[in-house]
Amino acid sequence: MANEDEWKNSIRRNYSYFKNNIADPLDVAEYLFGETNPPIITDNQKEQIKAENTTSKKVGKMLDILMKRGPRVPQCLFDAFMETHNEQCAKKLAPYLLAQEKHALKREPSEWPPLHEEHFDMMKEPVTYLRPNDPCCFLQYNNTDEVYSMRRECRGLVYLINNEQFHTLSQRDGTKFDRDNLKKLFTDLHFEVIVENNLTAEEIRKKTESISKCDKIKDSDCFIFIILTHGDEKGVCGIDGISVPVTTLTEMFEPNNCPEMNEKPKIFLIQACRGDKREMVCSSEDPVENGSQGDGGGDRVDGMNAPDINVEREPNISATQTVHSKSDFLVAYSTPEGSLSWRKTDAGSWFMQAIVWIFKFESHVKDLVEMLGKVNYVVSKGKARDVGSHFVTVSKYESSLRKKLFFFPGIYGDKRVHPKCI
């Protein structure tokens, strides 16, 4: 809850604007009396507002009364402004209310990867959905100069490749949790999710190229590619042990190859090792003989050439192209270049667990880049422990997005409630 100075300042700094711009203060006062529960102003206070002889004095009286009515005032006043067609006044309060929503977000676990009970409790919770007049939607939904359009009932395609069983490399135990959790997450965020399992390098190339040319891509506001696999410095690995450069995949969606996605966001989420470097730090805590931070199954790596460590024991130009061909991409990796990536055998990878957790609870108020910054922070807290020390990593992203990308869960079209949320 906001402290007294914070919520009062949200009124004080807009006091003069409200006095000069509220169309009919009696409409606002009537809403504050009749439509708030409990009423934010009393019947007697409403009559005091009516008794003033000018509009400006009525507004001043109403605001003076509200300054004594507690921290519910900004939200109630915002709602009143929206209902009485004082949208520009509502816009003055929206940044404060959005900041309060972010402050009240569900906190990430104190440990990462999270404890079993905490993780599986999180998986039962739904995506947090917007309402049409929520501050984030009000401020950003129609802000097409700075925000990508995400208005379709089905936002677009998510193409998810999950490689678990390899010809010669180790099996990726636990990846099925990532696959299932990501499919549920992006379905709830209004995407169509296509899942492929256990593809060779050639199949990864051919099937991804087929997706880039399919009819459904034409009706997409956004495209998301996800791969869960082993990897090395060269790229992501097919089940035959051959790697595919990430740039080979992203180039398939550049305007000259996929004109339908010109100026639209293209997101690549990569869960794979990018080398065999293991970052180890000394532990300031008591040595843990068995297990990683948290509980449950042990941690594994997604490297092609690295040993499977168990830390329990150890230019063409397109006619439709209007921006640079590398524009509107974001590629997020589970680990820095050259490093190993970590996965729990009974819950999924550190990186994808964090994406599901953060996106589920924060996508209604944060854009993609802000959420991925939080994902980096959460992943960096992870520790795969060995006796007297532990391994660490951090996720990272590279972006050429020209605008902010909000998922706007729960809203579509002309700010209508999404059919799945009714």
Image: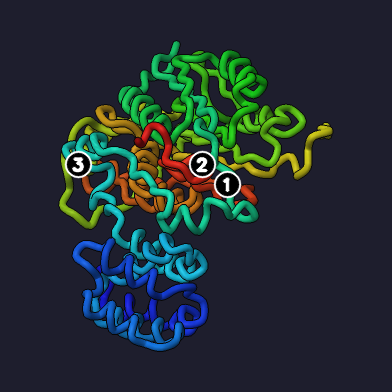
- The answer to whether any part of residue 123 appears in the image is yes
Q: Which residue is mark 2?
A: 332
Picture quarter containing residue 156?
A: top right
Up/down of 202 relative to 124, above or below: above
Q: Which residue is mark 1?
A: 398
How packed mark 3 is, by other alpha carbons closer than 10 Å (few <14, some 14-19, many 20 or more), is few
Measuring from the top left, give residue 96's x and y in whole percent: 40, 69
Up/down of 222 relative to 106, above or below: above
Amino acid type indicated by mark 1: Glu
Contact between marks 1 and 2 (CB within 8 A): the answer is yes
Tell us which disc is closer to us: 2 or 3: 3
Q: Which residue is mark 3?
A: 118
Element type at mark 2: strand
Query: For the residues marked 1 and 2, what is the alpha-carbon distance in whole angstroms?
Result: 6 Å
* 305 and 49: which is toward the camera: 49
- The structure residue drawn at horizontal position 45% and vertical position 73%, both measured from the top left corner, is 24
Query: For the residues marked 3 and 1, what is the alpha-carbon distance in whole angstroms?
Result: 30 Å
Query: For the residues marked 2 and 3, what is the alpha-carbon distance in whole angstroms?
Result: 25 Å
Residue reaching furthest top? 167
Picture quarter containing residue 180?
A: top left
Q: Earlier in the sequence, mark 2 or mark 3?
A: 3
Amino acid type indicated by mark 2: Ala
Measuring from the top left, give residue 37's x and y in whole percent: 21, 62
- The answer to whether any part of residue 231 appears in the image is no
Which quadrant is home to the N terminus? bottom left
Marks counted in the figure total: 3
Which quadrant is home to the C terminus? top left
